[in-house]
Image: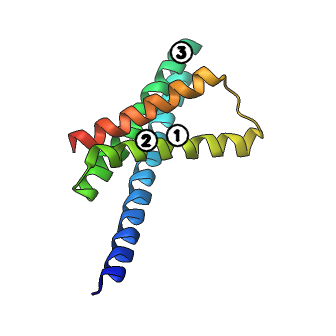
Amino acid sequence: MDRKNENQFQLKKTASDMVKSLLIAYVVTGIFLLILTLLLYKMGLSEQKVNIGVILIYVIATFSGGFVMGKLSMTHKFLWGLLTGVLYWGLLMLISFGIYHSLQAEMGSLLTTLLLCAGGGMLGGMVS
């Protein structure tokens, strides 16, 4: 295989691995959001506790995605985990924008969420 084909193959593999890791992160998000919803329904959690739960879900989900990406990439794991967290946040913002046609949060809150997602993904990549 010549160098050009080898680079194309590596790029396709990396893109495929990233999609897998993001899919894992969003599946984890869905599962934990269902659990949080049940807790809210059964226990009548306060808004503050629900917000803390959502933050924990972001970190756990991006950690999971970063961990999977780190296992699949084998090199520069923390960078791939960081990228996974940033892409997770980006997709989250696109979905939110698509639903509400605007971003429903303050800039400080968006930045905090970005840092939590990026940090969770990077930590997952480092641990992998």
Percent position of residue 110, x then y: 59, 28
Answer few, some or many: residues within 10 Å of disc 3's Cα (few below 14, many 20 plus, some between 14 and 19). some
For disc 2, the marked residue is 85
Q: Callout 2: 10 Å neighbours few (<14), some, many (20+)?
A: many
Q: What residue type is labelled 1?
A: Trp
Q: Which of marks 1 and 3 is nearer the N terminus?
A: 3
Above or below — where is 119 with respect to 65?
Answer: above
Against 57, residue 16 (above or below) is below
Q: Residue at the location (64% across, 24% down)?
A: 107
For image coordinates 47% across by 42% down, the residue present is 86
On residue 89, which mark appears? 1
Label 1: element kind: helix
- Between 24 and 109, which is closer to the camera in this rendering? 109
Measuring from the top left, give residue 54's x and y in whole percent: 50, 27
Mark toward the start of the polypeptide (2 vs 3): 3
Q: Where is residue 61 in the image (x, y as percent from the top left)?
A: 41, 39
**Residue 57 visible in the shown view:** no
Q: Which residue is drawn at 66% across and 22% down?
A: 106
Mark 1: few/some/many CA within 10 Å (<14, 14-19, 20+) = many
Q: What residue type is labelled 2?
A: Gly
Residue 67 versus residue 35 in the image, above or below: below
Label 1 or label 3, whichever lies nearer to me, is: 1
Depth check, mark 2 against mark 3: the one in front is: 2
Q: What residue type is labelled 3?
A: Leu
The residue that disc 3 covers is: 45
Q: In which quarter of the image is the C terminus?
A: top left
- Residue 17 falls left or right of residue 72: right
Look at the numbered disc 2 and give the secondary structure of its residue: helix
Query: Looking at the picture, how far across and down is residue 74, in whole percent?
Result: 22, 56
Of 108 and 19, the residue lying toward us: 108
Q: Would residue 63 be found to the left or right of residue 115 on screen?
A: left
